[in-house]
Image (cartoon, rainbow, N blue to C red):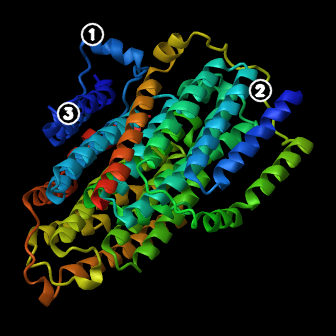
Amino acid sequence: MNALDVVLVAALVVSATMTVMTARLLRAVIGLAITSAILTMIMFRLAAPIAGVFELSVCAGLIPAIFISAIGLTRRLAAEELPARQQERLRRFWPLPVLLVLAIIVLTQWPLPIGLPDSQGPEPVTDLSTLLWNARPADLLAQVALLLGGAFAVVMLVKNVGREHE
Amino acid sequence: MRSLLILLPLAGLILLNLPGGLLAGLALPAVAALAIFEIVLAVYLPTAAFPALEQVQQLLHLSTPLDSLARVLLLSIGIVMLASLLVLHATVKAQRRRFNVANVLLISLMGMNGVVLVHDLFSLYVFLEVTSVASFVLIASSGEDTGLEGAFKYLVLSAVATVLMLSGVAMMFLFAGSTDFSAVAAALQNNSGQLLLKIAIGTFGCGLLIKGGLVPFHGWLPDAYQSAPAAISVLLAGVVTKVSGIYALFRLGISVVGLQTFSPVLLAVGALSMVVGALLALRQNSLKRLLAYSSVSQVGYIVLGLGCAGMGGPAGKLGLAAAIFHLFNHTIFKTLLFVNSAALEQRTGTSDMSVMGGLGSRMPITSTSSAIAALSIAGIPPLSGFWSKLLLIIALWQAGLYAYASLAVFVSVLTLAYMLTVQRRVFFGKCREDLLSAREASGGIVLVEAALALVIIGVGVLMPYVMNSFLLPLKGGF
């Protein structure tokens, strides 16, 4: 692990923590996108480019877009409500960064006594069409269903409820 | 042919949502047709399929032959989906909501079929997620606060299960270089002493126990069942948790890990769920909540049978057959009990038993079918539940697990106690003044009640036929 890896992992931890701790939904979505983008860089460094491409396009692109469309249908929090919400969130989640830092220290100083296999796993698939259509076609269909499920969630739980309230 | 069980729901979803809404009116019939197709396919799976479909099957990596367990699950999914649709038709009048729910039911159907059909740990995980996402949306689909709360609790615990399962898959992939069942099974055999693999099995198994709502991971289940709309409670209690948690546990044990590896854990978890679920059910006022805890208890029986299967030998085989038989029976009588609950909710506006009473004369079909389901779940002969419990207890006794066998008998008595309490509080006695205007539930619900009650009686009375055509193949099928 070199200095760049350490920086990336630290940035990942900070952005993920901020995503959870902010009281503003929009900032949380942006935090999610940044976390996914950093994770993409880590995946490229771990020689997993296809996983990285998916992480970037789906987790940093498509999913935040669905979240933002859902947030667009909700009522905006009043400016005076925000500090109290932020305080409450900080009070509830302050152990999270502490625990994360402790876990990093413990795991780097005293690695778990678990044996890893000698082999480096299967040959990485570099051809995207081979991966999608030959190796994992059922997963691809399931991903389509997941995205459609997300779209229906927005329609049924946010859009229609919003209409009923109006 | 079975690749259609994944492709058709997805195609249906796309067709129903074509611009202009040309086919929107066909949403409920389309889901019903797919459910019937699934029932037919589960009962009669053609060996010679069309060549084009064979190619699609190979493309989707679904070429491994279906075993008896998968067929039982496909049959259960088809039956419960059909029951849920009829309840949806009877209880939801708004066309728009019906259409939206039918769409998500298609996603749920695809997810559950995928879980049953795939032979790959990662694909199993992805289809479990599809089923879960559909379930969150369906639970919250009423738009009420209680529904959102129930869905949120399910979402949070399901996210924990996701992390555990995905970590388990990743660790197994490290050793096997693949997530295919057979490759992972071979890697587990070749590296049996590896701590990391034991952790992987443990984390994946814990994720499945959360999905199945077993003690001590059962916290989400009563809230989700109680807060979901009636038709969705039927689906969740009838089949979703069984496919998501219990079937996947069966599959992990039978096809990947080997049941003997974690037999003691399964026996302990099964016994704990059986007892805790029954004790908590005794204290409930809400009918749906009581039935949810009853599910925890009955699923405990199924897992106990799975644990017994890990003991090996003839007793183990009988235990496995009994577990699968009880899984099917529980699907039928729990679906019926939740349909009864939907009928009561339709006519009284609540599932709180403290404001019910004397409804037997007002709702004769609901009360009769409820009594049949209650007696079956308590293991009273000659109904279907009696036979599966009897086989399970014999298997436990033959395996030398006398304490577990005695516990199974004791919990049956507890089950009889809380189910008879339901009958007394809801149906027996003089009808309350404010319920005098109550009448039998609407046609679709009554039809489901009668059909499922007949299945319970039929399976019980025709036990010799069921034994030869269904249970004996299960004993030798793995």
Asked if B257 appears above or below B244 in the picture, the reply is: above
Asked if residue B8 shows in the view, the reply is yes
Circle 1: element type: helix
How many angstroms separate mark 2 from mark 3 (CA)?
45 Å
Q: Looking at the figure, which quarter contains the C terminus of chain B?
A: top left
Residue A28 x %, y %:
60, 48
Q: Are marks 2 and 3 on the same chain?
A: no
**Mark 3, other Cα within 10 Å: few <14 / some 14–19 / many ≥20:** some
Amino acid under label 2?
Answer: Pro
How many angstroms separate mark 3 from mark 1 (CA)?
19 Å
Residue toward you, A26 or B416 = A26
Residue toward you, B189 or A65 = A65
Q: Which mark is residue B51?
A: 1
Q: Which mark is residue A117?
A: 2
Q: Are marks 3 and 1 on the same chain?
A: yes
* Residue linked to disc 3: B37
Q: Residue at x 70, y 41 (%)?
A: B198
Q: Residue at x 26, y 64 (%)?
A: B337
Q: Residue at x 47, y 53 (%)?
A: B212
